[in-house]
Each structure stands twice: as structure tokens, then as C-alpha cells.
Amino acid sequence: DGGITQSPKYLFRKEGQNVTLSCEQNLNHDAMYWYRQDPGQGLRLIYYSQIVNDFQKGDIAEGYSVSREKKESFPLTVTSAQKNPTAFYLCASRSGPWNTEAFFGQGTRLTVV
Amino acid sequence: AQTVTQSQPEMSVQEAETVTLSCTYDTSESNYYLFWYKQPPSRQMILVIRQEAYKQQNATENRFSVNFQKAAKSFSLKISDSQLGDTAMYFCARADGSQGNLIFGKGTKLSVKP
């Protein structure tokens, strides 16, 4: 079955550590996105990529980094520079930039301990 | 930042009644696309309906329809014959073709009461 997979579902990080969230899709989609979801804040765009080896910052990119070395994969690294990383993170993909539907993973809940 | 605004943080409706969720947006693009997504308690995002800005006809999907007012940059969602399973967070989103981004509003929490 085609879909988009995020792992792990729950992640705990100690302060000062970097952590990487995985996002893999087998939908052959060109565009991939990372969002952060906090209560009352909706989905805020962190980074997005329209093509392999290219990505753009979203509204809240500070403290995060991404790579897009393969079409199927778009990992997000939460660095120690991110001051408040505890949140729910959603990855999405679309086949193109226009009216195509975005498909979402089931999310990763990151907690700083 | 070009924004998407949902002015109703929470709403409730009686089962079988009709409810309308509001959304306004800002864009400098001439062509763009608008979406409503539903996020039930499972947190899995589900597409409800989409609208292409150059189409004047309002989109409809079964019990869900939109009122798209391009000049006013308004895109409201009407849910008819509300069902208990409609209880969820609803997010309005805008996609700009030239930039490839997909921007969401803060969401409206809808509760359908029996």
C-alpha cells in the first residue's frame, strides 16, 4: 500500500541533544513538508521541498534542519538550538504544487525531558 | 507572512443541524488552491474538500460544501446534516502554485452534540 510513514511515533530527547525524525513516502511525490503542531497554533510550516536536493524554509525554520537526498525521504533534525522543541510533528507529501491533495503521516510526538 | 485565518477557535452543533466554519486568507498570487482538512482525535489529517481559485463554482462533496468569495478572500466550509463522526479539528489551507508551499490556519475545534 502506498503511503507516508513517520517514525518513531513517540520520541524523548534530553536538553542539548539533536534528534532526527524520519519521514518516508512511497507515493512518488515530488513535494514534501514538515509541520509543527502546538495547541491553539494550528500547523506551522517548518521546511518544505519541491524536488530532490532542494528545500526552502517555512515560517518557523530556526532550530531545525532538513535534507532531501532521495525523493522518498525527508528527515527533520531538531537541533539543540530549538528552544522549545516539545510538540507534535507532521510530515506531508504532494505530487505537485497545485491543487493536489497532501497526504500526511501519523505524526511524531517529541518530548524534551 | 501571507496568512490563513480561522476566527472561530471552537464551535458546537447539534446532530443533524448545519454549521459553517469561517476562513479568510491573504495572498498576492493570481492562482492558488484552497483546502479544508479534518483532524479527528486520532490526529490523522484527512482532506475534506478543495477549491481552485480560478473556478467560480463552489466545490461540493456530499454533506460538505464551500462558499468561496474570491474578492473577499473568504473560504467557508458548510457541513450539512452534522454527524457525531464530524467531531474534529478543521483546518483551512492555501497552496500557492508558484511557491509550492501549503499554509494552514490555526484550526476550528468542532463538537457535534447528540
Image: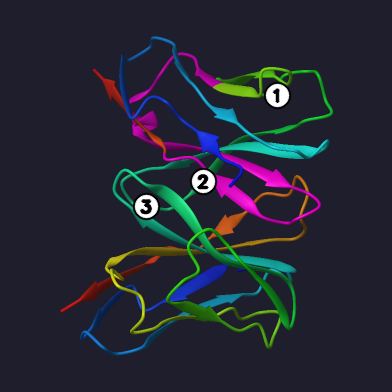
Residue B2 sits above or below residue B55 on the image:
below
Looking at the rendered structure, the kind of residue marked 3 is Arg
Q: Is residue B82 located in the magenta-colored stretch of the structure? A: yes
Q: In the rendering, at what x and y percent does residue A2 appear?
A: 63, 68
Q: In the rendering, at what x and y percent does residue B99 appear?
A: 75, 55
Give the left or right position of residue A19, taking residue A70 as reference.
Answer: left
The residue that label 3 is drawn on is B43
Residue B33: mark in rendering: none
Circle 2: element type: strand
Residue B59: mark in rendering: 1
Looking at the rendered structure, the kind of residue marked 2 is Ile
Residue B62 visible? The answer is: no
At a point 39% along the width and 30% down the height, the residue shown is: B86
Q: CA distance from mark 2 to mark 3?
A: 9 Å
At a point 29% along the width and 48% down the height, the residue shown is: A39
Chain letter of the residue beneath label 2 in the structure image: B
- Pointer 3 or 1: first along the chain: 3
Circle 3: element type: loop
Assess disc 1: are there few (<14), some (14-19) or many (≥20) residues with their C-alpha within 10 Å of its C-alpha.
Answer: some
